[in-house]
Amino acid sequence: MLAKIPGDYTFTSNGANLTLTGTFNGLAQSQTVTVADATANDVAGGNKTTDQTLNFDTFGIKLNLSSTRAAGDKLLGSAIATQISAAGDLTVNGVGSEITDVRLSGVAPGTYTLTYDSATDKVSMAGTVNGVATTQAVALSEGVANTTQTLNFSAFGAQIDIKSYQDHGAAFIGEELITLDGGSPSGDGELVVSSGANSALKFQSGPSSDAFIQIDTLNVQTGTTGTNAGQASEMMTLGTRITGSAAGNLGTLGSTNTIEQWQTAFKNAAAAVDNAIEYISTKRATFGSQMNRLSYVSTNLQAQSTNLQQSRSAMMDTDFAAETAKLTKGQIMQQAATAMLAQANQMPNVILSLLK
């Protein structure tokens, strides 16, 4: 599996140590890994295949090695390293294909394995869906330069987009997919979902990044197994009462059953419908209260926005001419008052001067 950066890379060996050197991101880089011995100590006397991966993660390059040895035979790691270095330089003209997007819809957390069948050019995903072991095979197309194909594992709710940068066979893609778990060419690939799509809806309710209202949507399916399996016992009981084959259910009733059996089954189904309706009503009330909270937050934000706009409008729409006239009037009246006060203070002095 190669990195996107083209170039020439050189292998050199020193005992069981294999060193890769080259230019990566404009810098001269080197990385050394140790090659393990390939041994075959099968007591049954048959051949044994040993797989190992040499991961030069500095360059984004992985070498997947596979060696089949007879019983009791051993190939030293130093010999493998010497063979690789003697093979010459590694030239990367560009990546053949890569995974550009993985979309998950309702996938539960867990590990899902990927296998490739070269005879049919199909990739299979296997895992547990709602407690049921599930496997789905999807056909691979040949890689066409500058095109993208989507592997739709609908049973799991997973889609994988693979873009090809050059023409190549479907086997190239399949063999790369099964090395996703660590590079073993004879193993299974893995898609690890650490956090599943839990259908949680989050709405911002405050100024900080963690201030939100979370609403978990409901799984109201009535199945008990498979991709249509529900989670609420009330809903699954309803499905069982309608399609179940056990006594007291409607699933297998026919013309040979008695009136009493039909009556019992319908009573059970009616009770299950009542419980399911009550469950839905309760959840609707919960969602209704959450919607009221959202409505209150929305109304409060709208009021704040309106007040802010009105304040801004009052400042922007000020009549500067009228305000300037009022300021001038105030200044004139202040000056007149000051002059009158000064004259009033002079009157006692005038009277005293007359008396003299």
Image: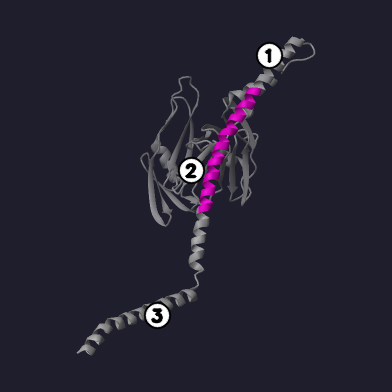
Image quarter of residue 273: top right
Seen in the picture, residue 179 relative to 321 is either above or below; the reply is: above
- Where residue 330 appears, x then y in whole percent? 41, 76
Q: Any mark on residue 332, and which?
A: 3
Q: SS at mark 1?
A: loop
Along the line of sight, the residue nearer the viewer: 85 or 245: 245
Residue 187 visible here = no
Residues at circles 3 and 2 in contact by the CB criterion of under 8 Å: no
Query: In the visual, does 6 lie left or right of 219?
Result: left
Along the line of sight, the residue nearer the viewer: 188 or 197: 197
- Where residue 88 appears, x then y in whole percent? 46, 48
> Residue drawn at (58%, 37%), measured in percent from left and top?
288
Instruction: Give whichever of discs 1 and 2 has the lower sequence position.
Output: 2
Q: Which residue is mark 2?
A: 212
Question: Which residue range is magenta in the image?
Answer: 274-303
Instruction: Give whichever of discs 3 and 2 has the lower sequence position.
Output: 2
CA–CA distance in space, label 3 to label 2 = 58 Å
Badge 2 amino acid: Phe
Q: SS at mark 3?
A: helix
Looking at the image, the residue that sits furthest to the left is 356
Residue 291 visible here = yes
Query: In the visual, does 171 lie left or right of 64?
Result: right
Along the line of sight, the residue nearer the viewer: 309 or 106: 309
Instruction: Give whichever of discs 1 and 3 has the lower sequence position.
Output: 1
Query: In the visual, does 158 lie left or right of 53?
Result: right
- Where residue 277 appears, x then y in whole percent? 64, 27
Q: SS at mark 2?
A: strand
Q: Any mark on residue 248, and which?
A: 1
Badge 3 amino acid: Ile
